[in-house]
Every structure is written in C-alpha cells, then in structure tokens.
Amino acid sequence: MTLAAAEAVTEPSRSREAKGRSIAWWGMAVLIATEAMIFATLLSSYVFVRAASKEWPLGHIEPPELGLIWFFTAILLGSSGPMFFAEHGIKKGNQARLRLGLALVSIMGASFLGFLVYEYHELEFGIRDNAYGSLFYAITGLHGAHVAGGLLMIGMLQIKAWLGRFSAERHETVAVIGMYWHFVDVVWIFVFSTLYLSVHVS
Amino acid sequence: MTLLEERPEAGEEAVETIWRDAPGLAGFFSTVDHKRIGMRYIYTAFVFFFVAGLQALVMRAQLTTAEADVVSPEVYNQLFTMHGTMMIFLFNTPVLAGFGNYILPLQLGTRDMAFPRLNAFSYWVFLLSGIFMISSLLIGKQPDGGWFAYVPLTEKAYSPGINMDFWGLGVAFAGISTTVGAVNFIVTTFKMRAPGMTVDRLPMFVWSILSMAFMVIFAVPAVTVASLLLEADRLFGTAFYNAEQGGSPLLYQHLFWFWGHPEVYILFVPATGMISMIIPVFARRPLAGYTWAAASLIAIGFISFGVWVHHMFATGLPALAMSFFSAASLIIAIPSGVLFFCWIATMWRGRVEWTTPMLFALGFMLIFLLGGITGVMVAVLPFDWQVHDSYFVVAHFHYVLNGAVVFPIFGALYFWLPKMTGRMLDERMGRWSFWTMFVGFNLAFFPMHILGFLGMPRRMYTYPGGLGWEALNVIITVGSAMFGLGTLLTVVAVVRSRTGGKPAGPNPWRADSLEWATASSPPPHYNFEAIPIVSGRHPLWEDEPVRDAESGDDSATRAYGPEGAVRRETPVTTGLDADPEETMTIPGETYVPFVLALGLAVIFVGLLVEATLVGIVGLVLAAAGLVTWGWRTEADLK
Ligand code: HEM
C-alpha cells in the first residue's frame, strides 16, 4: 500500500520539540494494521485448508526446498539494518548515511525479489494445480508485491535524498516508509515459517 | 508576526479565494474539501438507496399475489442479490461515512481531515465501484448468487456468466474506499482535535465513528480476501474454494462472516452515534451516562469479533449463516441496552421538543426494541430451526438494517442538512415523511414475522395460492409502497429546502457541539476562522460563543488563530490531551486522487472483461497517479 506512504509525504517539517508521533506515522500505523489483517487472513486460510487435508502439500507436490531461501530470508530481514542506519543518519542530518543506507536496502530487497522470481521458475507446481499451489502462490505473491511496493517507495526516497530534500528537521517520510519496510520484513517471518518451515517439520 | 502583516485577515475576500475551489468541472474533480466530499458521499449513497429501493418494490410487486408473473425467477434472483448488496455496500456503509466526513472534522474543531487527498480518493473509489456494480443492471446481468455469494454456487462451474464477477470485483473495489476512509477517521480523531478536547470530551458521534473505523480496519480485509479469492477461482482457475482440488468451500463462509458479523455493528454503531447527538439536543440536557455510553460503543466494537469466534467453536458452521443476525442481536443486547437506558434517561429528565429528527430517533428506538426482541427470539429458542431461512429472518434483518440504521440516517438528514446547505427542511413535510415511513415500515416488515411462522421461505420468486399467505403479502406490499412514498416525501422536502427553505443560521437547534459553532451554515471553506478552545463536553452550552484560540509564534500553535486559515493550515494536537504539537498544511486542489481511483477502476474493468490490455492501461494510470502523489508533496505544500 504505497498510497498512505504517498499521502504521508505531505508531512511538512516537524518542530524538534514535537512530542508525539506525526499524523503520517499514525496513518501508516493504521494502514499496517489492516495490511497485517490481510496477511493474517490468508495465512489462517492456509492453515485451515491444511488442517482439513489428509496430506500436505496436496497431490504429492514437492514443497519448496529450504536451502537458498534461508540465505535470502537473512538478506531480507537483514535489510532492516541499513534502513535503521539511514533513518538514524538523517536524524543527525547525515546525508551520506541516508543515501548509503537506502541504496543497501534497495539492493538487498531487489535481490530477495529476484530470488522469488527465480524460485517461481524452478518450482514444479503451478497456481492452478490444487489448493496448495493456489495458496502458496497467492501468499508469496502478495508478499512479493509488498516488497516491490516498498522498493518503489524507497526508490522515490532515494531520488529525493539525492535532491537533498531531507534534513535533520525534515525526515518524517523516511521514518514512515522505514516503518513500512520493517513491517514487510516482519510479515516474511510469518510467511516463511508457515509456508516453508512448517511443511518440512512434519 | 511581522511576516503576517501583509496577509489578509480570515473572513476577507482574499482569504475566501485562498480556499475557494476552481469553478465548474475543474473544481469538481480536484477538490479536497471534506465538506464537499461529505455531501457527495451522502447524495451518491442516496441515489443507490433509491435504485435498491426500486428493486425491492419490483420484488414486492412480484410477491403480492400467488403465482404472479411480473419477473422471471432469474430476474428475481438478481433483484434480491443486488438489492441486498447495494443497500449494504453502496448505501448504508458509505452514507455513514459521508456524515462522518462532513461532521467529524467540524465536531473536532479543525479545518479538514488528517489526509484530505486520501479522503477525495476514497470518495472517487466509492463512486466508481458503485458505477462498476450498477452497470451490471444496465446490461441486464446483475449478480444473482445472493448477497453473501456462497460458493460453490458462485463458482464458475455453477454461475458461468459475468454476473458474479460484478459482485466479487465490485465488493473488493468498494472495500478499498471503506478502508482508507477508516484510516482517515482514526487519525483525524487522534490528532486533529481542537485544544482542550480531551478524550472524555469527545462528542458521541465521534466515539461512534471511531469505533466503526476500528471495526472496519480489522474486519474488511476478510471480505476483501474472500471476494478476491473467489474471483481468482473464477477468472484464473485457482482452487481456493474448489473441493475437488483440495480447496474448501467452508473457508469462504468463515472469511465472509468474519467480516459479516462486525458489519452489522459497523452500520449500527454510527447510527447510534447519530441518535446520541440528536436526543440530548432536543431533550435540552446532556446525555445521561456519557461514560457508559461511550464505553458501550467501544465494547460493541470488541464484541463484534467475539461473536464470530463463538460461532467458530460452539455453533458449528451450518448454523453460521442462519444465526448471523440473531447471535449478533443476543450479544449486542448488553451494550446497546446501556445505550438505550442512556437515551431514555436523557429524555426522561429533559423536556423533549418533538422535531422531525427527534421523531426519527423515537421511531428508531421503537423499531430497535422490536428488532431486539425478535433477535433474542431467533438467538435463543430452538425454534430457530423452524424459522431458518424463512421470512422471519427477512423480517428480523430489516428491523435491524432498515429500521435501526435507516431511521437514524433520515433523522440525521433533518438534523444536519441545515448545517450543510444553510436552509431548514420543512417540519410539516418531515412529520408526514416520518409517519408514512414508520407506518409503512411496520406494515411491510411486521407481517413478515408471521409469514415466517407460516412457513414462507425467503428468496422464493413466487408461491402457490391457498396456503394462507396471500393477505399478508398484500399488506406487505402496501406497506413497502408506503415506506417508499415516505422516503420520497423527504426528497421533496430536501429539494424544496434548497430553493425556498428558511435560512438556518449557524445554530438552528441551539445544539452543543462544535459543528454548530461555525460562523455560518454552510460553514466557510476553512470551517473555523480561529480554532475554538474547548473547556467541556458541550462547548456551545458552556460558553457561547466559544472562545477562540490565538496563534503563538512557535511551530505548534502558529495556525490556531485566523492566521492559520489564511495559510491553509490547521493545528495537530496530541492523542490524549489535545495539546498543541505541530502544524499541518492542508493540500490544495489536485486531480491525483481521481486519476488514481480511475486507474483502479480501469484495472477492475480489465479483470471483469478479462482483457489484459485494459488491465495494463489501468496499471499505468494508477502508477502515474501514485508517483505524482508521492512526488508532489513537500514541494507544493511549502
Ligand atoms: C424500501 C424498503 C425495503 C423493502 C421493501 C425491502 C424488501 C426486501 C425484499 C422483498 C427482499 C427479498 C426477500 C427474499 O425474497 O428473500 C429483501 C432482501 C434483502 N434486503 Fe431489503 N427491503 C428494503 C430495505 C432494505 C434496506 C434499507 C436494507 C439494508 C440496508 C435491506 C437489506 C436487504 C438484504 C441484505 C436482503 C437479503 C438479500 C438476499 O437474500 O441476498 N433492505 N428486501
């Protein structure tokens, strides 16, 4: 949901003494709540269908392997690091840290997305094969779309950062989009555990 | 303040131009003024109300006599499906959002919503999704699988036409509007309140909108997912609900009702908020038990989800759909009983003026009482099984949805329209309208209970004679027509007031909350020249005229005084205590929300007609909208 983030950017400079969170922050927080519900609903659907099935994955499908995905999970979750780095940098007015941090986030996020595309290519089942396939692709696809949306927003942040539109006083947008990015990372933990780990455990 | 020397004062011609929208179509498509948007919401929703009402009347024409031949069974299926769908998705939900849009910022004492452009966007999405769904009527292919569209009936194999696609895509599309609207309500309530408006001074209507918005945030995703998975099955051949491929039809029902249960309250809660504003004004005393009433509104929000959980674990699924409204009614009994006593106590201790809004409030209470009783009946007794899917259920949910939601909406119209248009509605016409609606309503829906006992099933396009159903059906049709006539009388009253209504002045009802504190009706574009200072729960009853805040020279309070109106700014305050925090610039006119909504509409049309190219065009349009939205922010707000 790039939308609220976009609206969020309306935020003018905040006084340093501002006590609470900005309206943009609140808007993003509420939007994240509703997005979290979407993922919760889909993951519960997965669990629900699985619980009602005799075998899982259905139809003797080979579930996705665990090898490389560990690595890319680490990459995605790790990308929250440079995001924090960028946020804290600009809070102190450090433009270089902002640009470097954002660049790292983009590279890490993009490589995760690249791996997702690669994996789709490799997998031997399709979205139409059965309910397992449908759920797998719907959930990973939706998460992937969120990563892509986040990358777009970060791309825009980056251009603005190079144009020097942020400063120690004006950086609310960075914080708000940063929050969205952390959210996308956290959701992946749930998607990963449900769709990858739990299939291999049993 | 030196900088401000040359600036015009609020109220002067120049300030009016700073706020004025471009004339004609340009302003129409680009305005972000919450008042214009709110009005539009209301008018648009009423158009859908009358279309859905006409559909109901056609159904009644068909059912008046046994073995009638007004419409075919296929058309009858389309009629009840679209009637229910439009009433819920395109009338009830958005009309309440419309009142929220118009009234909430005024009651909070601010100059616009927290996200004005998002607000414009949510209106455009509502309008376009409505047009999307209603175009099925124009091409004669309305959805026909019932308003809750159960699978497997609605899967491609059993409903091959385009009909259900209008429903599945339309519902998901409309959900976007409801959701972003709720985000806006929540943040506006938290961050935009006038100084001094601590949480224990919020008007009841604000409490109700807040509770509604939280329910939307947590419930609507479920129906969005339910309908989109259905569409994925239908359009792309996925297997979510397809039992043969390991999918689960039950999953659909769970998802749908996870939203469906709270939805009753999503509609009901703002309606009670309206009533809680109207009664104290005409009883001329503060609402009795304010804290209890506010707590009840919030409690209803929480309980609404609990009801679903109870279904999951206790009742089991077959009963789920059937007792949708009934279990809801049982649990709702406690907090809504509290509200009820607050209203009664307020009237009891006050001296009631029987104006039209008050009549509607009374009508609401009577209907609600009856609806509550029948609800408890359906909920408790094993006779449940007997009335299952009979007209008893139809009677019951019309008492809840039509009685307990539509009557408050009409009351609110008589109450707030004078503020919105600056002209009073005719009281005599209002009384005629109310009594026709009230009598018509009971004639139409009370006998349905009896028909239910007599075994008449719902969703049946005709019935054989000789079962003792005929007389009641005639009464029902007469009542329905009367109800329809009553609503038309209000339309007449509205139209006549626009041209010849008595000028309302700023506070025609001598009411207490801040929307009545604006300098005029309709309020100026900037709502308040200076932001009012709130020192109690009933600002206008406590000190009229309310005190104005003055601008300070720090960034938190610089928009308090008329200077804020001059710069298109409004203060942002802290969540609990409404202490000054910072200043927000109100964006100017922009086409971007419209373009983005249009892009989404084109995407949905592309899905509907399964044309990839159309979908791509929509994506490009939407992306263009998003990028400009994100880009042109700080720069043009400086
Ligand atoms: C003008 C007043 C109204 C009349 C005369 C009316 C009449 C009807 C009739 C005849 C049916 C079909 C019953 C059947 O065959 O099963 C129906 C269904 C329904 N109505 Fe109304 N109605 C009115 C207002 C409303 C309002 C205001 C709402 C909600 C906000 C509403 C919501 C519904 C719903 C949800 C259904 C069920 C549709 C379905 O079975 O899928 N109605 N109504």
Image (cartoon, coloured by chain):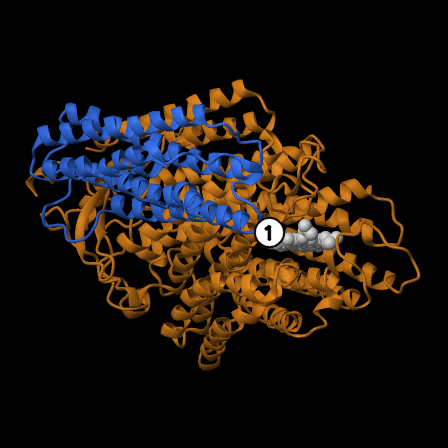
Chain colours: A blue, B orange
Q: Amino acid at mark 1?
A: Gln
Residue B17 visible: no
Is B71 placed left or right of A113 in the picture? right
- Label 1 CB less than 8 angstroms from ligand 1: no
Foreground pick, B491 / A155: A155
Residue drawn at x 33%, y 59% as measured from the top left: B514
Vertical placement of B530 versus B567: above or below?
below
Foreground pick, B41 / A12: A12
Vertical placement of B156 versus B500: above or below?
above
Foreground pick, A14 / A93: A93
Vertical placement of B630 versus A182: above or below?
above
Residue drawn at x 36%, y 58% as measured from the top left: B516
Check the picture and name the quadrant holding the C terminus of chain B. top left
- Residue where numbered disc 1 is placed: B253
SS assignment at label 1: helix
Is A20 placed left or right of B53 in the picture? left
**Could you say which quadrant of the image residue B405 lies in?**
bottom right
Q: Can you name the residue that lies furthest to the right here?
A: B466
